[in-house]
Image (spheres, coloured by chain):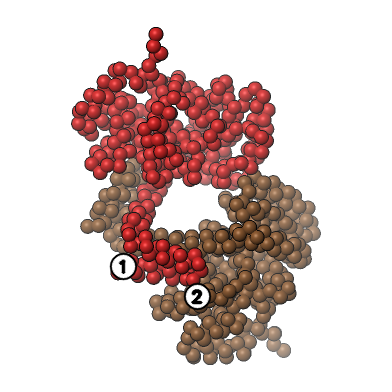
Chain colours: A red, B brown
Amino acid sequence: MFKKVPQIASKENISKIKRLREQALSVDHLVDGIFKGDKTALARAITLVESSAQEHLQKAEAIIEKCLSKKSHSVRIGITGVPGVGKSTFIEVFGKMLTEKGKKVAVLAVDPSSSLSKGSILGDKTRMQTLARDPNAFIRPSPAGDSLGGVAQKTREAMILCEAAGHDIILVETVGVGQSETAVHGMVDFFLLLKLAGSGDELQGIKRGIIEMADAIVINKADGPNEEQANWAKTEFTRALHLYPPKKNEWTPKVLTCSATENKGIIEIWQLIKDFVALTKQNGSFVDNRVRQRKNWFLQGVDEHLKRQFYSGQSSKSLLKKYLSMVEKGKMAPSHAIRKLFAEYRQ
Amino acid sequence: MFKKVPQIASKENISKIKRLREQALSVDHLVDGIFKGDKTALARAITLVESSAQEHLQKAEAIIEKCLSKKSHSVRIGITGVPGVGKSTFIEVFGKMLTEKGKKVAVLAVDPSSSLSKGSILGDKTRMQTLARDPNAFIRPSPAGDSLGGVAQKTREAMILCEAAGHDIILVETVGVGQSETAVHGMVDFFLLLKLAGSGDELQGIKRGIIEMADAIVINKADGPNEEQANWAKTEFTRALHLYPPKKNEWTPKVLTCSATENKGIIEIWQLIKDFVALTKQNGSFVDNRVRQRKNWFLQGVDEHLKRQFYSGQSSKSLLKKYLSMVEKGKMAPSHAIRKLFAEYRQ
């Protein structure tokens, strides 16, 4: 007997992929497939969107535009936590609970440290085997990219495609390298920080600024002998959250414990998120936040474009080097150096 | 009998100012005065540096350049706190203690909300009357400006001039409007947060991110019936500080109490700052921090210049408006809008 082949790699899917490859990747064909919830079409379209090849750009933009026009009532949930906290197991159990409730779940990731542009697909599939086989779940690893901005942009666009494919819960996972939590926080409705009850000094090890971003802190692995520590950590984190002023959206961040392996406390987390969505939709901050996120994404992109244009030039690079060195040595005031730099640059 | 005229407005000074005005404001003359510690020359030079008139630019830059070449062993201390916390009284008492120890003190300010470009000079002088009359103190109100970036830049430059004039302690006060604390934190060696023991819920009212910036939290007005509350607040803040991971410079932020009006706990604050300086000079982070600040100041300035150049144009403004509106309505993905914007802009 052979081991059961996961659905995604079934014979039927493989031949389907081949057929799609043989066809021209027509925009209408892909969008049609996405709207029907065809995971293969969705995956192909995301690949197009992630491509940096110039010839794919217009097709990608046309696909995104069409997908934007499709109404969605999705909830976007960001999930972060240090390696070892049990993110994969948590997402698998949490996702499974959602699909059992009839939800369609998409799992995306922002991992600027990943250089495994292809390998990590299999990696993620292995990590979340049960969810990967679920017809109502779609798992996509982090896009590769040189910059966090680029990686985050592609994930944002993949999210739009997943929503058009009918996925109403989008889970965006991040490993928390550098500023990646801020990037994920800027693209989701609800931000969940996974923690582990450990050595008793949990708060000390927490990354700066992250508590302020969290809508919920969930202490995982609250099972067996860890349970007491988890409850202790819950008290500590609750106190820490009280140190911050109330959020504008009127939501008070909460601390919960759970055990992903024992499937305990998982439904409570979903209930909490539903409370959050109900509150913020009612007071208008849910929509306000989405509009603000789109606006920021655009304005940040404009600034990045301006910088890229300038910093990629050969003359600007050498001018920057020259004046930066003078500034660092304290020989020239920065304002003076900037004026001279741009005067030379314009020549 | 007339009331004693403060030294700064003495007859001698007034005629000196007149003479200076009659002379051409020669760079060498001003720099010479600054190096001799002449407060009138210093004030005139700062006015030049703060001027936005094009004809003053080169003189100002020449003065700054010369002042940069003068060696200084200054300590730059940022002081923030909400209105009513007693900043002026604290600075007066703290400054006076320093001048009595033979230090030369300069008090600068970053207040982007101030539109009193002239009036506030007198305002500040009134607030710190004793210090203003002290020959070893120099008080300069916040420069006026449209943007925090502009105000902060001028204060940074004024700081260089004060240091060249022999002021070895620079106190930079900020009212904490918007991002002004971040701006001041980025130009000082030591950042002091003044707090008041009040209603018993001190931490709740604290501005986001500020605890992370503080090298010391000083609870002022710890006198009379307030003393108990102040000690309670000290415990609370100490605990809050422990929630943060250690700083790279190896400094552990401390909480102290003081009473500026009763002159209690003031020397202890100075001792703490001396400990900080000793530690960070020994481990190299003092100098590293200054180099990094200069570098950031330069790089931020380059980015600001790029943006200003772009955003001030008429065509870019209307393009931004057009595409931002499409993005906000969710009709176009930001990445697409950015590409179209710059394609149109280049035409």
Chain letter for mark 1? A
Residue B8 is marked as: none
What residue would you read off at disc 1?
A346
> Who's the residue at 32% across and 43% down the image?
B333
Q: Residues within 10 Å of mark 2 (few under 14, many from 20)?
A: many
Spatial CA distance of label 2 from label 1 is 24 Å
Q: Nearer the viewer, residue B2 or B23?
A: B23
Mark 2 and 1 residues: CB-CB less than 8 Å, in contact? no
> SS class of the residue under badge 2?
helix
One can see residue B164 in this view = yes
Instruction: Name the residue type under label 2.
Output: Ile
The residue to which callout 2 is attached is: B64
Say left or right for B209 vs B269: left
Q: x, y (%) of residue B128?
A: 66, 73
Residue type, numbered disc 1: Arg
Relative vertical location of residue A24 with respect to residue A2 in this rendering, above or below: below
